[in-house]
Amino acid sequence: MEQPALAMEFHLTAGDFNGAGDASGKIKRTLQQVGVKAEVIRRIAISAYEAEMNVIIHSLGGDIRAKVYPDRTEIEVKDSGPGIADVDQAMQEGYSTAPDHIREMGFGAGMGLPNMSRCADRFSIESKVGEGTTLRIIINH
Amino acid sequence: MNLREAKEIVKAEILWGDELLEREIRTACGADLLSDVLAFTKDKTLLLTGLTNVQVVKTAEISDMAAIVFVRGKYPATELVELAKERQVPLLVTSLSMFESCGRLHAAGLRGSGGEEL
């Protein structure tokens, strides 16, 4: 199996709004050090940040993993529930189940999943109610 | 336009980033919705916002923004300023409203970053 040149993993704690964005920031700075193009890093960082916010806002906690290969970066985000009942609905721009305190922070506008999908070259989402959600985002360098 | 010119146009005070005033600004975005900022802006954007939580700095860093202008005289907490220094995101405060700040910058030739030029 192909081994990534670089792998990073961060735990995301549900409700940790202060720490939200730290994992994506670290992924971004690491990619800058290995010389990935700025425009590509920007798309990777935005997808990772949106995914990270989603886990912190909506889930019971999870993990984000970034694997960097010479030609692409793969981001996998796995949480432990509660899962998304209707994935197609969640993918629609503007659809959101975020509470008011999240909206006051400037998030929860229903742009996260569509934005990740727009930034990605390949995007997949699997979710099972009561079990959790797994996102896979692949961005070519 | 560079950050120094933008600062003069909106009569802003610099909270942090004196040494980064030559930084280039290609476009601007006025938003209190960070989701929109992440979805629709380009790099080297000047962000004008009324939000003062730390996610504003993280959003700016993640999306390669040039600087943040807090409108209507809102000052962020020390924690936010410290994070901005660490992440090299200049911070400005203007007493002008969001509409007035955006209007003056637009009149000076700065344009939006979300494909508004239809």
Image (tube, coloured by chain):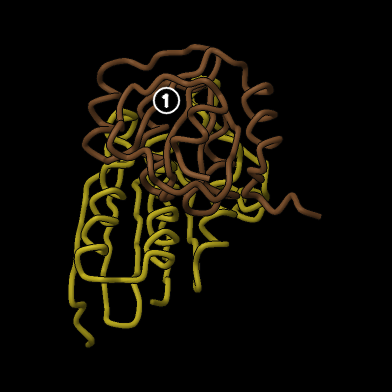
Front-lying residue, B108 or A75:
B108
Q: Colour of chain B?
A: brown
Place of residue A113 in the rendered image (x, y in percent of width and height, measured from the top left) = 54, 52
Judging by colour alone, the chain drawn in yellow in this rendered image is: A
Tag 1 residue: B92
Residue A40, quarter of the rendered image? bottom left
Q: Amino acid at mark 1?
A: Leu
- Looking at the image, can residue A99 be seen? no
Going 27% across and 37% down the picture, which residue do you hit? B19
Against B62, is A5 above or below? below
Q: Chain of mark 1?
A: B
Farthest bottom residue in view: A1
Front-lying residue, A20 or B89:
B89
Going 20% across and 64% down the picture, which residue do you hit? A33
Place of residue A90 in the rendered image (x, y in percent of width and height, measured from the top left) = 61, 48
Q: The C terminus of chain B is located in which quarter?
A: bottom right
Going 60% across and 49% down the picture, which residue do you hit? B40
B94 relative to A68 in the view: left or right? right
SS class of the residue under badge 1?
strand
> Mark 1: few, some, or many residues within 10 Å (few <14, many ≥20)?
many
Place of residue B89 in the rendered image (x, y in percent of width and height, measured from the top left) = 34, 38
